[in-house]
């Protein structure tokens, strides 16, 4: 386990109402509605942000839109390097709050 991954795991314990999960095969946080506000990807935090905080995160050196399939970046998701670990909690708390408001979709009928 890398230092960045250990930091992400510890951070997960400090975010209310999230549990570990998987997204794109990577470790992520899940809110009670099943949505993910953040994930850990190649020693980076990947977090779903909006508005000014999204722009601020993108302005950090080395940050970029998350692009897991190369050529199809996810517009709300920002990949933030471990160099900014002191800001990760701020970004995750905001994302978790926003994602928790998303209404859970009803299960599809078979």
Image (cartoon, rainbow, N blue to C red):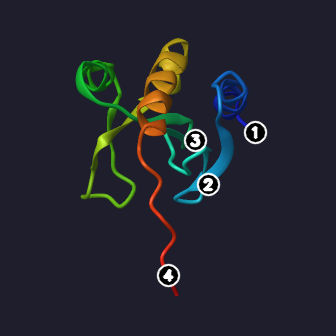
- Marks 2 and 1, the one that precedes in the sequence: 1
Residue at which label 3 appears: 31
All told, the count of numbered labels is: 4
Circles 3 and 2: CB distance less than 8 Å?
no
N-terminal-most mark, 3 or 4: 3
Secondary structure beneath label 2: strand
Work out whether 27 lies above or below 86: below
Q: SS at mark 1? A: loop
- Mark 4 and 2 residues: CB-CB less than 8 Å, in contact? no
Left or right: 81, with 3 as reference point: left
* Residue at left offset 56%, top offset 51%: 34
State the separation of the CA atoms marked 1 and 4.
40 Å
Q: Residue, x 33% and y 22% (percent of image)?
A: 57
**23 or 5: which is nearer to us?**
23
Q: Are marks 1 and 3 in contact (CB under 8 Å)?
A: no
The numbered disc on residue 63 is none
Q: Is residue 17 above or below residue 11?
A: below
Q: Which mark is residue 1?
A: 1
Tell me how far mark 3 sits from mark 2, CA to CA.
12 Å
Residue at 44 percent across and 38 percent down: it is 99
């Amino acid at each position: 386990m890398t230092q960045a991954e250990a930091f992400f795991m510890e951070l997960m314990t400090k975010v209310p109402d999230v549990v570990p999960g998987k997204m794109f095969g990577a470790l992520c946080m899940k809110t009670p509605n099943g949505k993910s506000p953040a994930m850990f990807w190649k020693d980076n935090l990947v977090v779903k942000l909006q508005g000014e905080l999204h722009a601020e995160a993108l302005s950090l050196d080395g940050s970029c839109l998350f692009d897991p399939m190369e050529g199809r970046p996810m517009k709300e998701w920002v990949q933030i390097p471990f160099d900014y670990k002191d800001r990760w909690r701020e970004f995750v708390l905001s994302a978790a709050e926003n994602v928790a408001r998303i209404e859970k979709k009803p299960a599809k009928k078979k």
